[in-house]
Amino acid sequence: MRAGPLTRRPIGTVAAAAVVALSLAGCSLFGDSDGDTGGGDGDAATGGSITVAATNFAHIDPQSITFGMWLVQMGLLEGLVLQTPDGTDVRPGVADEWEVSEDGTTYTFHLRDGIVWSNGEPLTADDFEWTYERLLDPERGASGVTTGASSYQVPLGILNAEDYNTGVITDFDQVGVEAVDEQTLEFTLDAPNPGFLMGLTYPSMLPLNPEAVEGEADWQQPENWVGNGPYNLAAWTANSSMRFERNPEYWDAENVALDEINVQLVEQGAITTTVPYENGEVDIQAIGEPAEISRFLADPVLSEQMHVLENAGTAYMIPLHSTNPVMEDPRVRTALSLGLGRQEIAGISEMTEPASTLLSPIVPGWTEEIAAHEQMWGEAAVAEAQELLADAGYPGGEGFPPLTLLAGSDFPQLDAIIDTWGTNLGIEVTKDVVEVGVYVERRYAMHDENYVGLWYGSFSGISTWPYQVEQLWSPDMLRQAGLDAAGYQQFVDAQVDETLSPGDRTAALEEILATSTTDEAQEFAELVAATRETVDEAEQQEIFIEAASVREDAELIIPVTWSHVVFVAQPRVQGLEIRAQADRYYFKDLWVDDSAQ
């Protein structure tokens, strides 16, 4: 074992019983579909409405990363397949059947007979092909996981999709997506991908109505909305609320129980209150404030209403780019990681664990062997951190430049990070908490020598190796983090060089990343690329595991904590299970039983 043992704190007998343990063992990700549709037991309890709280957003285009894409996925649009309620497998959606070729590289989906858009017009395989051509349009930008990026997921491994998205090729006919006929859609992959079906449940793969999107009116407004999900967008008051109404044209409308979904929009970073929930005005709400979680756990009634998914997200830090070279020293980065005080930071909340790796233990086949050090916290780790910092020329933190910790919202964990670095390493750290747009700009900007430090982020997603290794904290993200000041300035300049064609720009950026980043970051990128060169699934996973270990060793992305996802739901709400993907649950799986109050 290379990592220290996990420390688990009891969360109370009642709450512990509500914890959802995820495992992908036994998933039939390559097989034909034969699962049920999984509606909300509509025959037994049809009708009614619920009110949910959700993070606010500027738009609901699922092809661009925002909180809005997750709400769309929950009920306004539906893809070829859905996740099962527990998130361990897929079930039929728009497609009711599919086949996979013997070599695992061709997936053929058959759309349901008579499936239509909410306006009654037929939904065809051509609509999906058009949607994916729009998704991969180079003008929309490269894919990623940060706000504003294209939501295409590179680990899907669709033939030539990434090259088309980056302008290396310009003919969409070379991309492995083809509408064979009106009801048949075929994907060709670069290599077998055991995470492909689960990847199709990501918002980027939802179909869009071509006529609505290309029309002159704003297709995202209720009066212009054309969808294919169980619900239609009936009302939207910007920055305030939304209302969904049951879609009578939905293929499985008879199994959609709720008539209406009301959504209360809350600004990101705002302190959310549970008063409306406790007054019965809100039916489902995520809670993250440690004090609120502790209060709910201590209450014998409220604790029964908690739904907990353990270790579903990872908080992490990545160095900012600055002309001050201090963060380019691997001894400094390792010292910051080992001197972090993860146990103290995790101790702020009963729903947080100290993280030894970026990947949480819910990923099938996860092992502590991928951690960068045998001890990631404790006295031995701090002692090693102090020694490394002294070797780098900063004994006891003397002479070390003040660090900035950039974040898009204020969290108690930020203060804990600052305190533990001050106590353990003698380093001065200042928070820079800004609104999300400024945050995105600053974390990718080139800063002067007086602005040096790290940015703080958190993310969760599908618990598959391709997604967790190739999409989250991706090769390009790691290699960018590994560029020194001169290399990163070259990278920024190439990004905005209007004399370069899209293909030439892609080649120039790749050349900078491949030749100017750290050896570990480049090795990680090469290992991820090697996963596409094998047709053996077991071998592919072994390569992903090796790549994850190399990424940890690079210590360019520092894991901080694993966080549990906590939702509360009124007793009247039935069918709620929390999944690892950020949409968390589907509205179609819910129904209400007012006698359960």
Image (cartoon, rainbow, N blue to C red):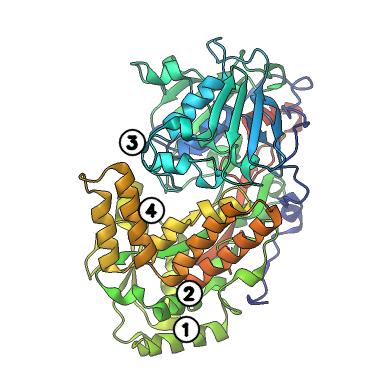
Task: For mark 1, give the secondary structure.
Answer: helix
Q: Amino acid at mark 2?
A: Ser
Of the image marks 2 and 4, the number of the one nearer the N terminus: 2
Q: Amino acid at mark 3?
A: Glu
Question: Label 3: which residue?
Answer: 139
- Residue 572: tell me if it is visible: no
Q: CA distance from mark 2 to mark 3?
A: 38 Å
Question: Label 1: which residue?
Answer: 385
Quadrant housing residue 85: top right
- Residue 12: tell me if it is visible: yes
Residue 337 is tagged as: 2
Please state the horizontal and vertical placement of residue 468, each as a whole percent of the image: 57, 54
Q: Residues within 10 Å of mark 1 (few under 14, many from 20)?
A: many
Q: Quadrant of the C terminus?
A: top right
Question: Label 4: which residue?
Answer: 408
Q: Residues within 10 Å of mark 3 (few under 14, many from 20)?
A: few
Of the image marks 3 and 1, the number of the one nearer the N terminus: 3
